[in-house]
Amino acid sequence: MSRFSRLRDRLKVAAMTCFVRLLRLIVVVAEWWPDRRRDQRGGSMGSVGPP
């Protein structure tokens, strides 16, 4: 029985790690995507330089 609970804990940790990695990837893409679209459109409202 303890073997099964240990396996379940391992699975839980693995799922959490995967979720955190996915969340980080989403954050990186969310930060990168609007800048990319703005550059294609040619707008001057970028996040580069002082406001």
Image: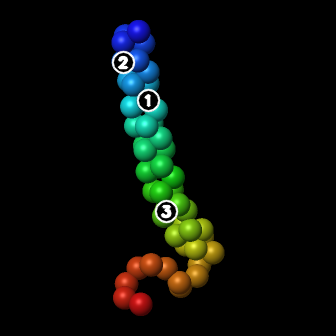
In the image, residue 47 sits, relative to residue 5, either above or below, namely below
CA gap, disc 3 and disc 1: 30 Å
User: Which residue is disc 3 drawn over?
Assistant: 32
Which is nearer the eye, 37 or 19?
19
Point 46% across, 32% down: residue: 15
CA gap, disc 1 and disc 2: 10 Å
Q: Nearer the viewer, mark 3 or mark 2?
A: 2
Which is nearer the eye, 35 or 25?
25
Marks 3 and 2 close (CB-CB < 8 Å): no
CA gap, disc 3 and disc 2: 39 Å
- Image check: 32 left or right of 41? left
Instruction: Name the residue type under label 2.
Output: Arg
User: Which residue is disc 1 drawn over?
Assistant: 12
Q: Quadrant of the C terminus?
A: bottom left
Which is nearer the eye, 17 or 38?
17
- Image check: 34 left or right of 25? right
User: Which residue is disc 2 drawn over?
Assistant: 6
Q: Position of residue 4 (x, y in %)?
A: 42, 12
Instruction: Name the residue type under label 1.
Output: Lys
In the image, residue 43 sits, relative to residue 35, either above or below, namely below
